[in-house]
């Protein structure tokens, strides 16, 4: 019999999961092995309400998570890849507070404001947690009257969205943003953003990908020539944005029923937005008899042509493709937009939702800074954001599949002893190693067994051990052990640091 | 005439600084140069209330700040020093959400709960921003039933305290914590924490420092033998904790008047808490006729003796001293406690408040994890926290004094041209450099002037420039320029990457 069923029945389908939890605890103290960990997890997962004092329920807030040392090791490797690319492209970094004045955020996310986390009014300013890093960046530029800036920013953002751990969607998640602000010659910074995105996705080895690009001006031109009022443009963009989750038929229906577009217009749009291709498609559209009459669309297409020239110089056109259906959800985009998606064949072991979503996105937003500036001074911007949570989930799953062992520390040497009462010597030796910059550990025991010490090396991946006993002390040497080969050699004490450094360099540890 | 005076008068000493701000803006649009930036800053600093839409006031929330690229460069250098020490000592790292269930925090900060930031009730759980990293760590250990863990955690914490920018006290600030959890032989992890603190403060080069240590058990013993009821112990600790801000006379008065201790008892305590010294003081206290009768104090002193032995093996006793007045503010400490303070003579140029405060602290907290565990399972912990905001202020001021130039990017090469219509070649070259892992920039202009390009190198500290023009292209070479020496040599195109890498390695850039 499955205990979770008993519990469910026992609590009469009540919404008070906290109560279920207490019952679960009660049961588990009597039948500790009968209540599966899964059941506990399942309840813990669903349970939202807090519990009374003295019966504290331990959990993280809904839609958030802790990162374990192993997860952090993976996460830091990803960050280091991303940051080294951002630095390779000459970006500075800034930091902004985790919350902003609520009214500064209100201005910029029309529909999304209901998803921001507000802080309680405890007397003082009304604050909200940041929803992305783009708006704080624009606020920073306007506030400091900065006209040019290439910066990256890696930080947590907050959305009271429906979390889905499986799809890598959290309420607290990290964004890795790279943006170029300033008035420059057309499409040069835009091309660099795509190059940055391409370099990062290649370096992260998440498998094949393509970068879909489009331009808000082309889209707007299409909407206009299809006879749809301009006022509906942003509605249509957010409907189109659902295309990676639902079918084209469903999007069409939504346009007709919810956005109130006539079926005829939807058919016209549909002809365009299903097109995708490279520079040839751009050439074709530049000659499209209807589009040529739309100034905005032509501007977008001319820029798109230039962009493809630059991308070709950067050698990345193979993985970039114009997709007229790409719309991007956020309102602030004004020009080129892009989104990178993984091609799924390489990820058959991943759950489908994970493998199909976008892993990076961005675009040009030329009006956002002006919104914050008292005189409306314009600072054109273009940028990108790496969807690091989804990438993290993919790499974590890949590692699990490959049963790859991940080190959570970088310790190079364990200071060990086979004898009792050698704590003082271990302490003296380890202190010397630390002072020489060598990463070293010892067990926090007065008299640890040698076997235990060597096992610790193997478990945690420490490559070297130095072993000091009475014999070694008398001979003025230290035993240096290679943990993998189990080879041991005596090294004169005075050469120890040098010898360790030599080995670490040789094995590139 | 000073405009700020006019404004102050104009607004009739009103509290509505937002109004002053608007008047300031109004004035400044008419007399742009007459309103000093300082006046604007002064108002901006004082102004707390938001402003109505259409007249957006740009500021960060009270007690928080943005970090500029230059500040981030300093900050990252500090972090890198701290993290490399934490890693040298074999620590893993974890991450936890920025907010926790409110009730989990409520349990642990008695008086401080009024200083936590609460999130608004938007339906769902009651959440608060974390107040420190210690309580989330204890929650993490208990929740995952982890018995042993040496971890570091660098993250922002939040306190609705009275901010003081001059003293480096903010409402959003970063903590750098290192903790060792687990049941081990006495004082071995404690000694390592002090070694870690010592290594970090030495490496950061913030000047001379001492680490004051004490033990909550010794303090409690003293309080008891002085005839003070145990119930007043925590009050006395927080009164004593003010000693670095006020005089001993003031502390005595507070004990008598506010804590309700009799003057006689205060005199008795006063004899003890003014003592400070090294191992000799420990020996003396171990023989103190009154203290020997107190079991708790003797335990503390025996451990202190052992700790000094270990610190001597680590070679750091010179900078560690037992101060019986050290109490630490937080309630959760149960054993040894410590705090590092800078010695001020080296910082005469710093403002006094900054130079005198503590820059690191920590101690043993053996009961905190048990508070979260449903069965009260005990996981003893000891740890430390580096006061990175204060250290940041000191290093920032030192840099300003020394007029040290700080690079905000790591760009190694600028790809430049003396000729028009060479954008395509620059793009091809820079792409090759990026693909070879070289940090490179180019100006985002179709036809930049050579002077402008070289000035950009000098301003931003880029050490190398490659210059491609028609002559070079025809000769199959690239001109490589050393920005500092202004020396130029022609390099065959096919050797370019290799030559750049050779030079970067040689100059260790």
Image: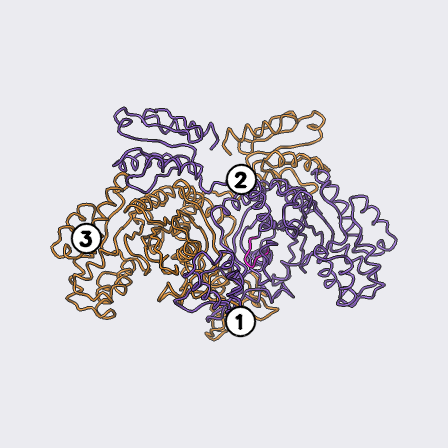
Chain colours: A purple, B orange
- Quarter of the figure with residue B357: bottom left
From the viewer's perspective, tell me whether residue A132 is left or right of residue A68.
right
* Circle 2 SS class: loop
* Distance (Cα) linking label 3 and label 1: 56 Å
Q: Is residue B34 visible?
A: no
Instruction: For marks 2 and 1, give the one nearer the viewer.
Output: 1
Mark 1 belongs to chain: A
* Circle 3 SS class: helix
- Quarter of the figure with residue A485: top left
Q: Give the labeled residue for mark 1.
A: A12
Task: Say which mark, if any, is on residue B298.
Answer: 3
Q: Nearer the viewer, residue A116 or A135?
A: A116
Q: Give the labeled residue for mark 2.
A: A404
The percent position of residue B367, horizontal first and vertical second, equals 33, 57
* Distance (Cα) linking label 2 and label 3: 50 Å
The percent position of residue A326, horizontal first and vertical second, equals 73, 53
Q: Residue at x 37, y 39 (%)?
A: A441
Q: Is residue A68 above or below residue A6?
A: above
Q: Residue at x 33, y 31 (%)?
A: A467
Range covered by the magenta-colored residues = A169-174
């Amino acid at each position: 019999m499955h205990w979770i069923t008993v519990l469910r029945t026992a609590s009469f389908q009540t919404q008070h999961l906290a109560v279920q939890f207490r019952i679960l605890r009660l049961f588990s103290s009597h039948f500790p092995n009968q209540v599966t960990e899964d059941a506990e997890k399942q309840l813990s997962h669903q349970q939202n309400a807090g519990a009374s004092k003295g019966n504290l329920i331990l959990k993280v807030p809904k839609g958030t998570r802790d990162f374990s040392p192993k997860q952090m090791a993976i996460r830091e490797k990803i960050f280091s890849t991303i940051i080294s690319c951002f630095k390779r492209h000459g970006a500075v970094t800034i930091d902004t507070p985790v919350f902003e004045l609520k009214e500064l955020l209100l201005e910029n996310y029309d529909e999304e404001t209901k998803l921001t986390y507000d802080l309680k009014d405890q007397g003082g300013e009304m604050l909200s947690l940041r929803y992305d890093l783009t708006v704080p960046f624009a606020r920073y530029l306007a506030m400091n009257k900065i006209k040019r800036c290439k910066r990256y920013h890696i930080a947590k953002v907050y959305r009271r969205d429906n979390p889905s751990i499986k799809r890598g969607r959290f309420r607290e998640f990290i964004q890795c943003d790279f943006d170029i602000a300033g008035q420059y010659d057309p499409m040069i910074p835009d091309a660099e953003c795509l190059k940055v995105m391409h370099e990062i996705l290649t370096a992260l080895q998440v498998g094949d990908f393509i970068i879909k690009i489009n331009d808000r001006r082309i889209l707007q031109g299409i909407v206009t020539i299809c006879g749809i009022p301009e006022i509906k443009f942003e509605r249509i963009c957010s409907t189109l944005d659902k295309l990676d989750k639902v079918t084209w038929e469903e999007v069409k229906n939504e346009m007709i029923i919810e956005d109130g577009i006539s079926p005829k217009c939807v058919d016209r749009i549909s002809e365009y937005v299903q097109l995708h291709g490279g520079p040839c498609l751009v050439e074709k559209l530049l000659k499209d008899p209807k589009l040529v009459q739309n100034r905005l669309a032509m501007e977008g297409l001319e820029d798109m042509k230039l962009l493809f020239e630059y991308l070709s110089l950067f050698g990345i056109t193979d993985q970039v493709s114009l997709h007229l259906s790409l719309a991007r959800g956020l309102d602030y985009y004004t020009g080129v937009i892009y989104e990178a998606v993984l091609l799924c064949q390489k990820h058959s072991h991943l759950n489908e939702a994970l493998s199909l979503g976008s892993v990076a996105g961005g675009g040009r937003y030329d009006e956002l800074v002006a919104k914050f500036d008292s005189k409306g001074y314009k600072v054109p911007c273009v940028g990108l954001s790496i969807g690091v949570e989804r990438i993290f989930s993919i790499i974590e799953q890949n590692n699990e599949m490959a049963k790859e062992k991940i080190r959570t520390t970088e310790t190079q040497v364990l200071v060990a002893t086979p004898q009792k009462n050698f704590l003082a010597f271990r302490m003296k030796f380890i202190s010397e190693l630390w002072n020489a910059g060598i990463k070293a550990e010892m067990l926090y025991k007065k008299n640890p067994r040698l076997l235990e010490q060597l096992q610790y090396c193997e478990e945690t991946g420490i490559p070297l051990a130095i072993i000091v006993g009475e014999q070694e002390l008398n001979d003025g040497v230290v035993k240096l052990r290679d943990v993998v080969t189990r080879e041991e050699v005596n090294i004169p004490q005075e050469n120890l640091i040098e010898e360790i450094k030599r080995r670490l360099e040789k094995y590139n540890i």
